[in-house]
Image (tube, rainbow, N blue to C red):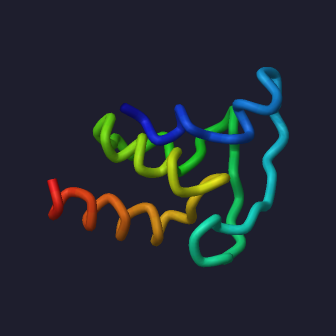
Amino acid sequence: MLIALLCKSREKEVNNTTDRVIKCAKCGAAFTCKPRGNCWCNHYQLSTAQLQELKDNYADCLCEGCLILLAEKIRKTT
């Protein structure tokens, strides 16, 4: 499944075409979310378990670095 399916920007506004600068829910680093554009998160596929882990533990999107580290950590424990 695509990580973009959990995108809070998509959840909040179905027709949202505006990029938003947000802080990573894990490390606080600023990054740009492009909910209707070519966002970097559209290139990542995670398992259903990984997506559920993100949804259960984070209120919003993670930066690319944290997402990669978390996916690797979850992969090692499953």
Residue 47 to residue 53: above or below: above
Residue 10: x, y in percent? 70, 32
Above or below residue 24? Residue 42 is above
On screen, residue 11 versus residue 47, left or right, reads: right
- Quadrant containing the N terminus is top left
Residue 17: name its quadrant. top right
- Image position, residue 53 (x, y; %): 41, 49
- Quick check: 71 above or below 5? below
Looking at the rendered structure, the number of numbered marks drawn on it comes to 0
Q: Residue at x 59, y 46 (%)?
A: 39
| Side (left or right) of 21 relative to 51 | right
Residue at (47, 51) in percent of width and height: 54
Pick the residue in front: 64 or 6: 6
Could you say which quadrant of the image residue 73 lies in? bottom left
> Where's residue 64, x and y in %?
49, 64
**Viewer-proximal residue among 2 and 12:** 12
Position of residue 16 measured from the top left corner of the image (x, y, whole percent): 82, 30
The residue lying at 67 percent from left, 76 percent from top is 28
* Lateral position of residue 72 relative to residue 7, left or right: left
Q: Nearer the viewer, residue 24 or 34?
A: 24
